[in-house]
Image (cartoon, grey):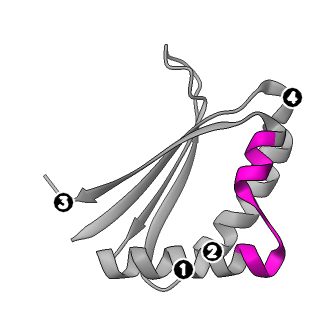
Amino acid sequence: MQIVSIDLFIVPKESVEEFLEQSFIVQGFIKTVPGFIEGFAYEKTNGDIEYNYMTTAVWESEAAFQNAGRAIGAEFQRRGFNPQALFERLRVKRIRSEYTRSAY
């Protein structure tokens, strides 16, 4: 069964540029991880929810998802990148969740 990781972000206006730059770098790496199927980044254009950015990543299986977590963590360590520190500095709030996916 496929696993979908969905992240919702509240990004202050003054932090958008750096947030998007860093997101693009991370997404570029994620696309190279074995088991990755597809991913999308969304920017809110209308609506009542305060979250203004969302990303999705679809993984072929639970095992691929778990391996991806380790690979991404290792890449962050290699680069000296700490996403939590970045979010704190930019005042970004994030909610992360995982779902199974099936066609309907």
Residue 16's quadrant in the figure? top right
Name the residue carrying label 2. 73
Q: CA distance from mark 3 to mark 2?
A: 27 Å
Mark 3 nearby-residue class (10 Å; few <14, some 14–19, many ≥20): few
Q: Magenta region's main secondary structure?
A: helix
- Please state which of residues 51 and 97 is positioned toward the viewer in this rendering: 97
Residue 2's quadrant in the figure? bottom left
> Which marked residue is nearer to the observer: mark 2 or mark 4?
2
Name the residue carrying label 1. 70
Tell me the SS state at disc 2. Answer: helix
Q: Return the disc, 3 or 2, that comes first in the chain's sequence.
A: 2
Name the residue carrying label 3. 102
Q: Amino acid at mark 3?
A: Ser
Stretch of the chain drawn in magenta:
76-88
Labelled disc at residue 12? none
Q: Return the disc, 2 or 4, that comes first in the chain's sequence.
A: 4
Tell me the SS state at disc 3. Answer: loop
Name the residue carrying label 4. 14
Mark 4 nearby-residue class (10 Å; few <14, some 14–19, many ≥20): few
Q: Amino acid at mark 1?
A: Arg
Q: Residue extending furthest left?
A: 104
Q: Return the disc, 1 or 3, that comes first in the chain's sequence.
A: 1
- The residue at the point 40 percent across, 65 percent down is 58
Q: Amino acid at mark 4?
A: Glu
Tell me the SS state at disc 1. Answer: helix
Q: Is residue 58 magenta?
A: no
The reply to whether callout 3 and callout 4 are in contact (CB within 8 Å) is no
The reply to whether callout 4 and callout 1 are in contact (CB within 8 Å) is no
Q: Amino acid at mark 2?
A: Gly
The reply to whether callout 2 and callout 1 are in contact (CB within 8 Å) is yes
Tell me the SS state at disc 4. Answer: helix
- The residue at the point 58 percent across, 74 percent down is 31
